[in-house]
Amino acid sequence: MGEQRTSRPTRAWLAFLMIIGLVAAALATTSPANAEHPSEGDFTLTILHNNDGESQLLNAGSGLEDFGGIARFAEVVKAAEVDAKQGNNRGSILVSSGDNFLAGPEFTAGVENGIPFYDTIALDSLNYDAISFGNHDFDFGPDVLTDFLSGYTNMPQYLASNVDFTGEPGLQAFVDSGDISASTVVNVKGERIGIIGALTQQISFISSPRNVVVNDVAPAVQAEVDSLTADGVDKIVLISHLQNIGEDIALAAVLDGVDVMVAGGGDEVLANPGDLLVPGDVPFGSYPQLAIDVDGDTVPVVTTAGNYKYLGELEVDFDADGNVIGWNGGPIRVAAGDNPDAVAKESGNLNARVVEPVSEFLAALDQTVVGTSEVALDGRRSQVRTTETNEGNLIADSLLVKGQERAASFGVDSPDVALQNGGGIRNDDFRGPGAITLLDTFDMVPFSNFLVVVPDIPRSQFKDIMENAVSRVEFTDGRFAQIAGFSMIYDAGAPAGSRVLSIVLDDGTPIVTGGAVVAGADVAIATINFLANGGDQYPFNDAPFTLMGLTYQQALADYIETDLGGVISAADYPEGGEGRITRLN
């Protein structure tokens, strides 16, 4: 008995010591123990990063004019680079994880100005060490991307380990010249830093890559890791545009040898207590997120919200053998005005060469009024991708009406219905009540999409098309459709592919009843060429379609100005929609 009494506290004490040891080990791998004073042979790399700039060159948007902006962002980068070089065995790199421009009035200003585009001028001035491609970089097709890249005077290394450009001669020329590659090695204070790029495989149905081929991500990245490692590179950073940080965390689990991952495409805000955020931003999680690779090693994963609102700053400590032994960092807010972290100045060069001419172009658009709205138009991302909204109805109606008006002159059947994917509506706010300008229409529907009519779609295929539209509504996916010319009931709780219960045309013709297709005539659909080409996985199945000679932005502006007589009435477009789409469960 006495022996048992003395052994129990001894075991408890040993267990306590073991826990303390485990905690100490965990802290040693998650804290920047050597960030300020690295031991001899150790090295601290500061990774400065951003993603999804998306042509937001002036500021972070309406109501956030004192945040973001490329001229301010440049000064934040400059200051961070100076800080990162203080002390021995320290250095920095600057990388972007893609979506380096986005269709809209700002990018249109650059295109109309000619090569170099304003976005190219902006990125050129920042002296990135490496940039990953993003899906939006292909939205205008390979030819415009080629023009964008052609404008650089000092082109940064563009990286894409899993992309084959041989089918596009314009882009392949950059591969041949070495400006586009799978990976690169940057020398920082005598240390060789390997950087690898990767692009989402979803690009074939969310953008317009034409003959650019995107292969499996993991094998391509691992092949580059192995090649760099064989060449003696022991510090490797992956910059990728996989659409959300969860994809990078999942990718880490099948990779070996990647030390840090810089994600793009998800717009997640990573922050820690005390980090200053742009008003309205809510942290997705802590900075950095942690992933576990195939060997069980911890990999820090970082990203930033886009629109030049933040510069990410991750300090990573490496030992003499290239092993990660600590990290620290967070987002640096890009601010101006009366904010405590306001930049002392803005880049005069970028103000003169980019900000001022883009501002003048937008001011001219904003002076052109196309109509007045009696109601606030809901274009919020969270709504247009999940439910019917009055702005979605307005845009879908513009496609239907303009398609009907132009069908005869283009020798095509007049459309019965219209579809607009929520991902193609980009203003992410309420517009109105009040004047609606040409600039507003660009903000709502900014891409280079054209109005098309797809005739002779069998009813069973139309049901499949609408099944796709609601197949990922729970994920706030951009494929969710805003509709015109019909009403629909669907069950969000049913398995994807069997959710649509009812489709009825506005003239009362049933297409689907009780989940079953009703026999009858084919359906003609007005939509945008992106969807007709299979974007967002819409199963048009290579059905022939006819371009109607209007972009969807032009269709919207003309519909408001001409067909609605310049008045968007609350009766026609009530807040919350008018019951075109009914969701069960």
Image (cartoon, rainbow, N blue to C red):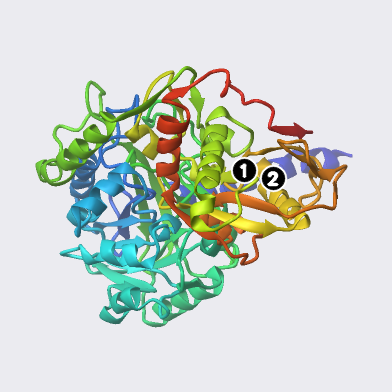
Report the side of 165 relative to 120 (left or right): right
Amino acid on which the number 1 mark rests in the picture: Ala
Amino acid on which the number 2 mark rests in the picture: Val
User: Splitting the image into 4 quarters, where does residue 338 fall?
Assistant: top left
The dot on residue 481 is 1
As measured in the structure, the alpha-carbon distance from the residue carrying label 1 to the one carrying label 2 is 7 Å
Asked if marks 1 and 2 touch (Cβ < 8 Å), the reply is: yes
Residue at coordinates 61% horizontally, 23% vertically from top-left? 576
Q: Position of residue 256 (x, y in %)?
A: 53, 70
Give the structural element (helix, strand or loop) at label 1: strand
Residue at coordinates 63% horizontally, 37% vertically from top-left? 386
Q: Which residue is mark 2?
A: 470
The N terminus - image quarter = top right
The C terminus - image quarter = top right
Give the mark toward the camera: 1 or 2. 1
Q: Position of residue 541 (x, y in %)?
A: 65, 65
Residue at coordinates 65% horizontally, 52% vertically from top-left? 524
Looking at this view, is 129 or 156 the one in front?
156
Give the structural element (helix, strand or loop) at label 2: loop
Looking at this view, is 265 or 415 the one in front?
415
Q: Can the viewer see residue 242 in this picture? A: no
Q: Is residue 194 above or below residue 477?
A: below
Q: Closer to the N terminus: mark 1 or mark 2?
A: 2
